[in-house]
Amino acid sequence: MADSTPQTNDSPSVVTPPMAERRPVVLEAHGDVRTDDWFWLRDKDDPEVIAHLDAENAWTTAAMAHTNALQTALYEEMVARIEETDLSVPVKKGPWLYYGRTQEGANYGIHCRRPVDGSEDDEQVILDENVLAEGYDYFGLANLAISPNHQWLAYATDVTGGERYTLTFRNLESGERSAEQIEDTSYGIAWANDNATVFYVRVDEAMRPFQLWKHRVGTDPATDSLVRQEDDDRFYLGVGGTRDDAFILCSLDSKVTSEVWVLDADDPDGTFRVIEPRRQGIEYAVDHVRAEPATGQPGRFLIVTNDEAEDFRLMAAPEETPGRAHWTEVIPSQPGVRLDGVDPFAGHLVIYERHDGSTRIRVVDDHGNDRTIEQPESPSTVWAGANPEYDTEVLRYEYTSLATPRSVYDLDLADGSLTLRKRQPVLGDFDPAHYRTERRWATAPDGTQVPISLVWRPDLVDAPGPDGQGPAVGGGAPCLLYGYGSYEASMDPTFSSLRLSLLDRGVIFAIAHVRGGGELGRQWYENGKFAAKPNTFTDFVACARTLIDEGWTSPDRLAARGGSAGGLLMGAVANLAPELFRAVIAEVPFVDCLTTILDETLPLTVLEWEEWGNPVEDPEIYAVMKSYSPYDNVAISDAAGQPVRYPSILATGGLSDPRVGFWEPAKWVTKLRAANPENEILLKMEMGAGHGGPSGRYDAWKDEAFVYAFMLDALAMADAVPVPYPSDASST
């Protein structure tokens, strides 16, 4: 970073970073002893902890004060590109068109509907989040669900960021809210077809969704019925419904095992029955195809499973006897193709797949006709849009790339015609033709080819040739490399109008699709978890080296970014190869992973053992986790005995975060400073939010402007301004 001397009058007395007192705590497992000097920072009920976090925020404000003008400029650029008053594409459900809209100056969305045969003047606001958020620093909405007869709205709110929601009901005919409110609910809700019964989920003390409850609207929640409780700490419970509204689904999932129970949605007081009892390592998801009397086709369940199919296959089962013994194969497993999911509709199936690191959609009709929806760019991303009606001849899907804004399409399934319904507006002179996106590959230490998705302005950045040879700007352009690599989550290339503030300053944006994600199928995930977890980190380093070696960038112009499990990635690569990066942004980072996963009393720890391994019982996993845990591996000196200089690091956290404890970034930042006072380390702690950071859209944009300012300052680009497009578009 540049000079961190405060330049504003609001923080003139903050001239040095805070240093928390050392209070050593000895931690022992498997005969191994660790000393944690800052274990005490995990107690948010300790006034000294809060005082320390306040001091960290004050230091960050002071250290970033010289970028205030840059932050303002970035924020104003971002807002200037956004259609602040905007409308989503309406979605038909029964007699209504449902849609959302935003208004200039309002932080949150407004949910609306109007009759299918009505006009815009017939709009009915069913929920205004801005009204609900009044008086709160944080606001989150979940479980927005309309009853089958469109009379009742269920919704859940969180005003702390702690992800414990209050469930509420509103009568859409009268506009009145039902008297009852249900506290401490979680994600997931399902209406029965009687339009009065609602199934919802509660969490235990460890924030694990573990109970399914049944409520009748208008009654006292104290009389609600407990339908099911899951006592195995590895499993979390969810609730939903089939696409045809015929069944309520209660899903029980660990990281590697599934069990689904079903209930006839017309019989909410009936009994759930199991599709197939859980078997360790077998995953499955369920939907339903209703009976077709005209053709004699009986109703059946559709099951996407990895049973005898590493990358999943599609099975069908009779309604009355849905167990494994009665499954028949509909779509076999295909080598190199990951079956992500299937949506059934009357007359056709929509199939979502991954192949060669890219998403694709196929449509198969009842006559066996198979159509793949072709996309215009590679790399790009395509996914299901809003398709709430089972009987439809139009498929809505969405498309984007790193250069093309999010686009909503309607595909006519009868004639194959395609209609663009809406493309995300980007105000100003934005033209996607001025940007180029491409996929490159890095070679990991074990020879594995790791994909990298890139986007850049070719008039500002000269791309190297395919062999790594060719012109580059100043020995390499500035570059931001993003990564995640856990939970089989794919970091697919998508557009961001905010990111244009970087691209138009000549910054390259790249995504490292490292192992541990799901981009290249189940093996890609398996080879980045448990004892193989270090592959995630060495893959990212290989991607960074490739970008440097091919001439895209250079170590003094390369920044890295990741959040949550991707924040663990940031901490690990900062330890592995600090010389490759000038700056690192680690958001809500899981950097004290070993101590957390050893502590069964912390939220979600036992659930996580099937992702990271169980270091409590397994000495090998303990050793592997200790080898990469960022907090446990902060370097003090190199092989020559010289102090290790880390990249400039910005870490963030949330005091109410139930997923990654706020103390993890707080402890990590403190240890990095203690290791070498020359390390430039900042902590930005949200004192009134959780894992997702600020909840309002304007606050989120300001937060992004802050992150960009940190990065640009670290890359010596604080004075850079957006470059107008060349007058001759052909130059790109």
Image: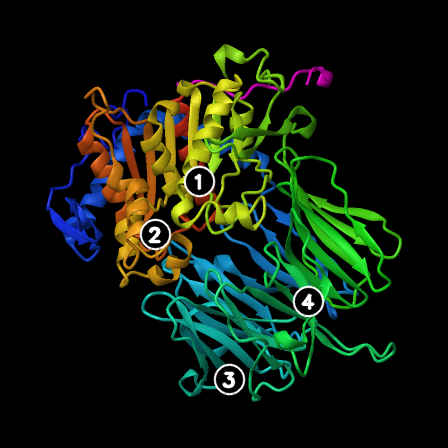
Residue 727, given in percent of the width and then of the height, sits at 69, 15
Q: What amino acid is at disc 1?
A: Thr
Give residue 402's mark. none
Judging by the rendered image, the residue that carries numbered circle 4 is 315
Find the magenta span and give its range: 716-732
Whether residue 287 can be seen here: yes
Residue in the foreground of this view, choosing between 620 and 355: 620
Tell me if residue 4 is in the magenta stretch.
Answer: no
Judging by the rendered image, the residue that carries numbered circle 3 is 218
Quadrant position of the C terminus in the picture: top right
Q: What amino acid is at disc 4?
A: Met
Residue in the foreground of this view, choosing between 119 and 347: 347
Residue 20, given in percent of the width and then of the height, sits at 15, 41
Residue 702 image-quadrant placement: top left
Residue at left offset 55%, top offset 64% = 283
Left or right of 644 in this view: 723: right
For marks 3 and 4, the one nearer the N-term is 3
Q: What amino acid is at disc 2?
A: Val
